[in-house]
Image: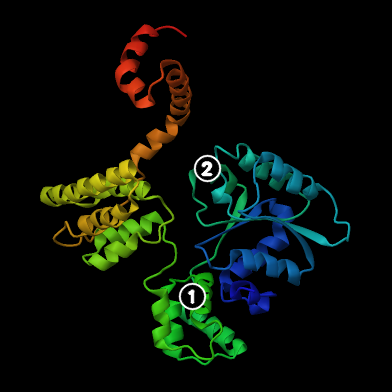
Amino acid sequence: MLWVFKYRPKSLNEFVNQKEAIQKFIQWYKNWKNIKKAALLFGPPGTGKSCFVEAFARDNNLELIQLNASDKRDYNSIRNIIGNAAKTLSISKKGKMFFIDEVDGISAREDTGAVKEIIRIIQESKFPIVLAANDPFDPKLKELRENCELIEFKRLSVFDIEKKLIEILEKEGIKYDRSIVREIASRNNGDLRGAINDLEIVARNKKEIKREDLEILGFRDREQQIFEALKILFKTKSAMAAKLSIVNLDMEPDEIFYWIEENIANEYEKIEEIARAYECLSKADLFRKRILSRQNWRYLVYMNDLMAIGVALSKKEMYRKFTKYRPPSILKLLAQTKQIREQEKIKLKEFTEKLHCSTKKIKTEFMPYLSKIFEGKK
């Protein structure tokens, strides 16, 4: 069994810190019938939101019915699994609690109606509803927030994480140097789950952990949000820091490319710095095109270095200002025109079968004439 599951808190007594959040949650739980609002737990990954709900339900002998990020969470699923159960008493006559994890991950397009159904359940439920999110201020959750009591789970301190890691090592009977444990705790930036995973990688099946064991982790860090990555990339003067800023992003290289492209002129003010940054990005774009045309993924390392290190070192000095980074306008445009482009693909495929040539030839040679022919016609 993985250590993150093995050492998951069984009760609130085993819970690491978050005293303020726990007190606020208990106060909400006592009054939820009067306020008719759900509890929305929010905070970075690894701060204990899901663990807390499970531990609280266990301590209070509640039947916990939950939907996780891996479950289908469209309108019908939420209605069938939670909506109906929220109106009926438990067979075991225990109290109930409903929990929907990562509500900010519910897709507005694919899970149409899901958020509205959650709001309806909150207003009609005979039992408390708990939600969790990394980012509760997502625009699609605006109406949902109005029906929730927001409870923040903050990043854990290095001391709190270190204490938990030492507890695990002692239960596993593994010898340790406290400075090594502290290094694992500090590198995860308040993410206890990430720290436990790192500890397991270093210490599992060993009698003692040594400093050289940390080499297996390399420069691996927790998955960063794109805004954090951009902040590091644009503010640093270190080539290694710039390179590592995009390594663990859960994004395609193309998407990272567009985020950087959108925000160069947003961050840099001097014309020569902007020019150097875009020149590096244009070279990265050449490698991007070669990857696509030749399917040679060895070029990816050059693309990444140019768009990260190249752009970061294009400035002379770090700008000590706050910059609000913007999402790429091209991605917004692609999202808006997705349906049109899908229909175009279907039509092009029909033409290729009839005209016996490639879609590229039809788009470049035939479409200008076909567009004129069909202009004004349905």
Q: Where the N terminus falls, by quadrant? A: bottom right
Frontmost residue, 241 versus 286:
286
Q: Residue furthest left?
A: 272
* Image position of 80 (left or right of 366): right
Instruction: Tell me the colour scheme of the image.
Output: rainbow
Report the residue at 31% width, 15% height from top.
Answer: 368
Frontmost residue, 203 versus 260:
203
Report the residue at 58% width, 54% height from top.
Answer: 102
Residue under numbered circle 1: 198
Frontmost residue, 232 versus 39:
232
* Image position of 93 (left or right of 250): right
Frontmost residue, 326 versus 369:
369
The percent coordinates of residue 303 (x first, y second) are: 27, 53
Residue under numbered circle 2: 140
Tell me if mark 2 has few (under 14), some (14-19) or many (20+) residues whose alpha carbon lies within 10 angstroms of its own: some
Q: Amino acid at mark 1?
A: Asp
* Image position of 266 (left or right of 127): left
